[in-house]
Structure formats: C-alpha cells, structure tokens
Image: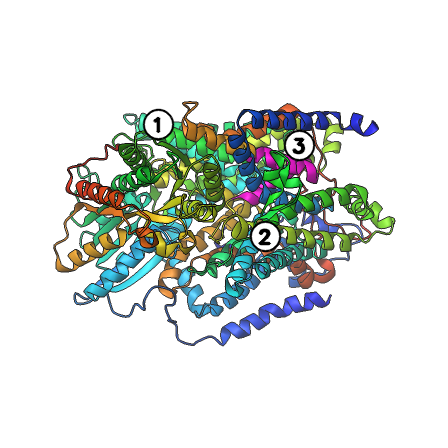
Amino acid sequence: MPDKDVAPPPATPAAAPAVLERGAPPTPGGLWGALIRYQAIVVPVVGLVVAFVVGALLIRQQGVNPTYAYKTLFQSALFTRDGLNQTLQRTTPLIFTGLAVAVPLRVGLFNIGAQGQFIFGALAAAVVGYKLHSAPGIVIILVALLCGLLAGAMWASIAGFLKTSRGVHEVISTIMLNSIAVNIIDYLINNPFKEKGQAIPRTPQIAPQAFLNDMGIVPIGFPIAVILAVGTAWMLRRTTLGFQFETVGRNKAAAGYAGIKINKMILLAMALAGAFAGLAGGIETLGDIHRYESGFNANLGFDGITIALLARSNPVATIPAAFLVGALRAGASALQFDTGIQPEVVDMLLAITLLFVSLPLVAKLIFRRYAAKGSALTSGWGS
Amino acid sequence: MKAMRYLALTPIAALALAGCGGSTGNSNTSGSSSAASGDCSKPDVFCVGLVTDTGKIDDKSFNQSAWEGVEAGGKATGAQVKDIETVSTNDYATNIKQFTDKKYDVIVTVGFLMADATVKAAAQYPDTKFIGVDQFIDTSKVKSPNLTGLSFNEDQAGYAAGYLAGLMTKTNKIGDVLGQEIPPVQKYDKGYKAGALAANPKVKVTSVYHPAGDNAFQDPVWGAGEAKKQLAQGVDIVFGAGGSTGNGAIQETAKASGAGKTVFCIGVDVDQWDSVPAAQPCLITSAEKHLSQGVTDLIKQAKDGSIKGGNFIGTAGVSPYHAFDSSVPADVKTKVADVVAKLANGSLKTGVTL
Amino acid sequence: MAWFSRNRSVTLTAVAIIVAAYVFYAINQRVAVSMIDFAWSFAVPLVLAACVGVMGERSGVINIGIEGQMLVGAFSGFFTAAATQSLWAGVIAGVLSGMLMGAFLAWTTVKWQMDQIIAGVVINIIATGLTSFYYKSGQSLTHVMPNIDIPLLSKIPLIGPVFFEGGPIALTTLVIVAILHFALFRTRWGLRTRAVGEYPSAADTAGINVIAMRLLNVTIAGGLAGLAGAYLSMEATPTFERGMTAGRGFLALAIMIFGAWRPLRAFAAALFFGFTSALASQLQASNIVSLPQQFINLLPYVLTLVVLAAAAGRVRPPAAAGQPFVKGEGS
C-alpha cells in the first residue's frame, strides 16, 4: 500500500473529534479502540483494498490475471529505480494541484481553474528559463519558480476578484478562465514566445543550467511539495489565518459576526491556490518538459480535483493521494505493455478507489456505532 | 441495511472470482497487438513497436494509419509488431522505454509532440532505429543516424484538393473546418486556399479553427454546427481537416440538401470514403498523406538496412473520386491530375510557408 | 403589472435582445438565420444539461457528473442504434442509461450520504473509462434523425426556421424547458422540490419525503442528461467519438449558474453563449477584424464573464445544495 511509504496523515479535523461528541458511546480500548481512534486512516485503507478487489474483477473480465496485473503495475511503479523515479516525478505536480483545489475547498470555494493557473505558471517559468539563458542556474530557477507562482496566483486572483467585487460565482469564472488561458497561451507561443525556425508552436528550450535535476531518484520538486503540504496543514490548524479560513468555510454568517473579513479570505485563498498551481507548472517546466509546448500536461490541473477529494481536502493527505495516482499512472505503461489491457483501466481503478474511500457506508460497516459522523466535505457551491 | 450487506459481499465474491483466474502468471496479450512471443534481443527476431500519440489506436486518424503501416510493414518483413497507447504526454518516455527495454529493433513514435522524447531516446539507444511520424528533424542540431523523421507535404494535398474545389464551386464560396492551429493542419489549410485561388481567382475561402484548444480534434458536434453555418451562408464545398471535428463537418455536409449534386465535401489524411462512410453522399475526394505507406516503406528499409537518418518526405495527394467519378467533368479531372503531377515533380510550388 | 415590476430588468433585456435579433435579420437575413441556428444547435445539449443541474440543485443535490452522464447517454444511445438500426431504440437506451447514472448519483449521495462532488467526479471518470474501454470502431447509423417542421410556427420569420424546424430532440428540448420551468414554479411538485432544496428539515416537518423527492428528481434529471448525449451522437452528428462531450457538461454547470438556477434563464444563457460562439467563428472566417484567431475565440468566455460581472447579481444557489439530509438531524 502506498500509504505506508509516507507519514500517516493525521485525522481530519472533522473526523477525529466527532467520536468524542456528547452522546457517543464510550470508546473501547485495545486494538479495536485504536482502530476506532484512527479510523480516518483505517477507512481509506480499507476502501483502497476493496477498490482493488473490485478492480481485480474488471481486469479479470478483460481476460487478464489480476494478480499478475497488480504485480506488474506495482513492480514497475515502485520497485525499480526508474519506476520509482517516474512515480515521484508524477506525484510532485499532483500534490501541488491537489493543494490548489483543497485549500479553497476549506474556505468553501470550488476551484475548477487549477488547470488554467497551472499552464500560466508553466509558461511563465519557460519564458524566464529561456530569456535569462546566460544567468547562473540557481538564479534562473528561483526567478522562474517565482514568476510561475505569481502567474498562477494572478490568474486565480481574477476569479477571486470577480467573486468578491462582482459576485461572479467561482465555478463559472474558473471554467471560463481555463478556456481563456488556453487561448491566450496558444497565441503567446505562436507569436512572441515562439521558438525561431520551428513550425511547432512552442517556446525554445530553457537554459540547461536551469534544469531541475533529480537527487538520486527523488526529483527536487518532491520534497518542496511535501514541505508545502505539511506547512499548509500547519497554517490551517495553528495560525489565525487558518482559523479564519476554516470559519469562513464552515459558516459565513458566523465568520461575519466574528469580524472576519470574508472577502479578504476569499481573495487570499484563491491567490494561494493559484500560487500552488503556478508553482506546480514551474516545477514541471524546469524539471521535466524543459519548455512550454501546448498539449503537454493537459490534465494535471483537473487531476488536482480528484486528489483533493481523495484526500478529503486535508493538505497532508494530498501526499499519499497524489502518490497513489502517480504510482498508478507510472505503472500503467508496463501494465499495458505486459498484459495488453487497455490503459483506461488505471483511471477506472482510481474512480473505484475514490468511490470506496469516500462512501460513508464503509466506515459504518466496519465501526458500526463508533463510526465517525461524516460531514459534507464540500459544503455546496458557497455564495 | 440489506443493501449494506450486499455491499459487504461484493469484495468477497470478487476475490473468489479473481482467485479462480488462470494460474499462469503471464496471461494472453489481448487487444490489437499481436502476441509477443519471440525474444526481440535475438538478431534473427525482428521487432517493430509503435507508440501512439495521446489517443487510441483505432482513432480513424493518424494513430490508426501509422499502426496500419506498421502492420503492413510487419507482414512484409516478417516482423513481430506491438503497440502501446499513450494516455498523457507525460507517458511518452516511459512508453518508448517499454520497447527499448525489450530490445525492439524499430520503434515508431507518432505525432510531433513526441519529437523531443524521440530525439532523446534515439541518442540513448543508438542501436535501435527510430521512426518519428509527423516529426521534422532539425538536422543542424540532431545528428542521430538511427532517427528518421517521416513528414509530409500536407500543403500539396491541400493544394490539389483546393484546386479541385475551386474548379467545382458554383457559388465561388468554399469553406474549411479545422482542428487546432498546428503545423499539419495549417499546411492543409494554406495549401487548400492557395490551390483554390490558383484555380479560380474569384473564390472566397471561409476557414475556421476550433476555438477551444485542447479538445479541438474531438468535437464532431462543433464541426457539424460550423459546417451547417457555412453551408447556410452559401458555401458549397466543405473541407474538414481536424480529426473527429473535421469528420463532423463532412458528415453534416452529407446531410445537407443538394449533397452530392451541388454541395460537396472533402476529407483529410486518408481516403475517408472508407473510414467515414456517413460522408459518402458528398465526399468528392480526400486530401491524403500516405502515412501508412511511408511507415511501411521505412520499416522495409530498416529491415534491409538501407534506412538513413534525417528526414524522409512521404507522398501526399488526393484520393479517387469513387462514386463521383462520373459527375466530375473530364476537363476538371485532367487539370487536377496535371496539378498533382506538377506538384510531385516539383515544377509547381504551393508557396505555403509557416 | 406586479409581475412586470418584479421582473423588469429581465423582461427589458429579453425585449432588447429580440429586437436586436430582428434588426440583424432585417440587415442580413441569411447570415442572421445561419448564426442563430448555429447558436441553437450549440445550445441544445447545454440547455438540457443545465436543466439536469437545475433539477438536482433545486432539490439539494449538486451534480458535477453531468459530463459523464451525457457521455454514457451518447455512447449507449449510438451503439444501441447502430446495433438495432433503430434511432428510437437508441434514444430510449440513451435516456435510460442516463437515468441509471442519475440513479447512481442519487443513491450514493442521498441514501448513503456520500459527498456529492465526489460522486460526480467518480461518475465522470468512470464514464470516460467505460465509454473508451468498450468503444468499437466501424459502427454507423443507416438513418439520420428526421427533420420535423412544425406547421405555422415554422413560418415565423427568423424564429420559425431556427427553433421550429429541426430534429426531434431539439424540438423536445423546447418543450422540456417550458414544462420544467412551469413545473418548478407553478406546481405542487415544484414547490416541494424547492422546499427540499432550500430547507429540507422544514420540508420534512411538513410531511414531504425529502429522501424520495431527491432520489426521484436526480434520477429523472439523469434521463435528461442521457437525452443530451443522444442529441450529440445521433442528432447533431451520426457518430460517437471518445470524449465527444468535450467539456459541455462543465459548461452547462456554468450556464446553470449564469441562468440563476432557472430553466428559462438557463435557456437564454445557453443561447447567448451559442451566439457568441457563432460570432467568434464568423469573425474568424471573415477577416473583418485583424485579430489573431485565439483572441477572437475567447470572445464567448470573456463576454460571459463581462455580462455576469456587469449584472453583479449575487444570485444565490439553493441553500441546501451539497448538504446530505439525515432525517431528524436538521441541517
């Protein structure tokens, strides 16, 4: 199980205290008690197992031995040097885009625009990366990442601003902004930033000294992503800003009475989300693609939605969630090659996992009356 | 509560069923790829692998054409062939690696987006031959002798089709419905315009690219709507160039009143008479690039060792008129054939630059 | 009169748009009809899909899986029609499969209180996977949808040839929007639906079966999504392609919000979006303005944002949308 490879995510704030609510039965001790206390971890793991068993049926139905398929999938994704490197490479941006969706969710905003923010970040980093070609590597890297971050944050802030000043719903504005971003960037890489002498619309390659290389098998972006995920969790739990975010997310009216500036929180949350997505774009550009070319990374932003939901918008839990998705994607290639099974099976597996991890029924079946009360993770469309 | 019990039973049943599965580790390799039995590292086993661009092997478009070329080439050379479908651009390198790990002799990569990944792999595995479909190699920078880029003069096919359209139009208005603004599509478009104007200086060409970027090649509904709009504004020949989007346009034209008599459509990439039968009522010809043929030729060359690194330009042209053979006037046919011949021998230039 | 004063701005806007459309018609009949026809063909699936969203959210269930429901509808509709060579069998299969997807959403979220957004995302991923997995190339339809001409109505200038002449699903869509709007605001079912979506615990106290209401509405709405899919693969084009919904399900969510959770306004919003798309492609083709095509192409998206920002209507979603209802817990 991929979950074992990383620090266990702490209980979601919604889940852990719920057991101790008034009227809840006294918690038994021993192993059973421990399982109940840590059900925020136990439930996803059980859900994952159930999902893989159901997935086995699907694989079997395609005429492939499921045991062999899973062995191939995980062996190639986790137990070879290249495979693990690929898995981490894919995990990295997914943690960021997961955070880009998870953080606004905590404030009651649904950011469908991580994709647009991501590609703006990626383009900004690519442009810095080739324009500053004579600067030292570290300078280019820092400036490129900063510009990527700012580009993403600015793009997301348009949605935040439209919401706070004109009341435009963020779901509409982020959907529209995604399409607008694709078109603007398509123009930019066909015109001012186009590689000379190339028919293909793409930017020149970034300066080689600015490539973000791997440290052994770990891409440099990975620890950054982990640190940011943990930092975000800390921010949400331990700082005033985090408290304000959560309060706005839970109950706008109450937040208003408590004197929290709701609009400021919305703007901040969107900017922060865009910064995460933009940074992801920057790291992808410097670490993997080394230029901007349209058609690349067409889905990482949308994957962020899946990750955030899989993690129940808990920032630290985005790490194992992204790792799971990264491993599935990295192993899919060998799976297809060795068994001939169509590659979509991996996405189906992911969907089934998301289903079983999120079904409150699973917790109820295991823990009966001790099951933590599920709360709606996404409290509607907000307003 | 009952439902819950069933839910609990599902995994158990599934486990039981799964457990009953074959005991052999390696199960059949199903799907379109033929069973990979021989060991490709042996010198007497000739293996050809194909990595698709994002999309499926049966996409009725370039992936499928390339795969048909590999199959034909495999048959001709007795090669063992296999494909791998790419889901996302992030998979290019990993998918190529599957073949290099198994020591395939020839690896065909499809689409210009894979150019970087192919160049990198070719440098890393000098003993493997790489064929990059739709990839134009900048020979001043890339020197790998084991990498051959297969590209086409789409502008010539577009020019010939446009020439035909220019001669056939009664309203002096022709249209094209396009996918994304990328080199192959632009070349078709510009060639089409140039050819139409050469045949008929009074002609007006309405050309529209799909607006949304990422799914520009998978939106037949938009293509159909755009074709309908153009037809309503007096266009009488529609050229659909853009995967499923273009197919939507020619299928819509086939439904229009007067289709096949006063209104015609032109297909793209392959002879769409066979691949899009719904367009037959209006499909006068297709602007073709002979992708399958090019891939097959290169595989044969790879087998007999005559393949050269650098660029290989495949042929392009227009398809037969099929059912419209009798309705296209004889002098039009002669003129178009003349243009095709002149384009092929280089005496006529399309004037298209990107 | 009271009605007019309540809806003044909406009515005035509607009148202005209709007048503008006819002025355009008077100037260039051919271009006007073709562009508005494009707008309506573009809008049909969006309108149906927006109605799916409206029915769900009005009864308290967010449906982000419309894209997947449409895709499944398009898929099963087309392949059933190809196998049986009957378009009607195809349409029925499309609607039923949509309802099945609707029932999945309803059951998981209403019965089992699963998070609604998650359930929707699951639907989208599974739909994309399944329809790609079981796709078979080389299938085709031998018939096309008949073109129906409504007597008298189709003779009205401009509106007639655009709305009252066309395929059966497009015509049905007009009826569905009108009925849904009427039902939502003028019938007992509508009152109950809205009560369930705004204040479920009060509705429950008043004796309305909240769970049953939500299950029913979300399932029926799934059928509409299936119909939208059938439109894509059988009426607008005679073909199914992988991923052919091309984001229309998400666009429909935006249209639904743009339309303030009202079927008629969503209809207008979808037409607006369709018209700006027609305008974009018209401008692209005609070279009237020498802008790069990318800037012309973002016109529909930018105009939508501008209109929304200018209207500055803080429209409010149904209060209980997104909240699972557990009897006796209040919400």
- On the question of residue C69 being in view, the answer is yes
Q: Is residue C268 magenta?
A: yes
Q: Are marks 2 and 3 in contact (CB under 8 Å)?
A: no
Please tell me if label 2 and label 3 are on a single chain.
no
Q: Which mark is residue C69?
A: 2
Q: Which mark is residue A68?
A: none
Q: Is residue C187 magenta?
A: no
Dot 2, how many residues are within 10 Å of its Cα: few (below 14), some (14-19), or many (20+)?
A: many
Question: Is label 1 or label 3 in front?
Answer: 1
Give the image location of residue B343, x and y in percent. Answer: 19, 40
Q: Are marks 1 and 3 in contact (CB under 8 Å)?
A: no
Towards the viewer: C188 or A274: C188
Left or right placement of residue A290 versus residue C71 in this view: left
Identity, as a three-letter code, of the amino acid under mark 1: Asn
Dot 1, how many residues are within 10 Å of its Cα: few (below 14), some (14-19), or many (20+)?
A: some
Q: Which residue is mark 1?
A: A191
The magenta segment is: C247-274
Towards the viewer: C309 or A120: C309
Report in which chain the residue with disc 3 lies.
Answer: A
Which secondary structure, mark 2?
helix
Q: Which residue is mark 3?
A: A244
Give the image location of residue A78, x and y in percent. Answer: 41, 56
Dot 3, how many residues are within 10 Å of its Cα: few (below 14), some (14-19), or many (20+)?
A: many
Left or right placement of residue B185 versus residue A169 in this view: left
Give the image location of residue C211, x and y in percent. Answer: 76, 54
Mark with earlier residue (1, 3):
1
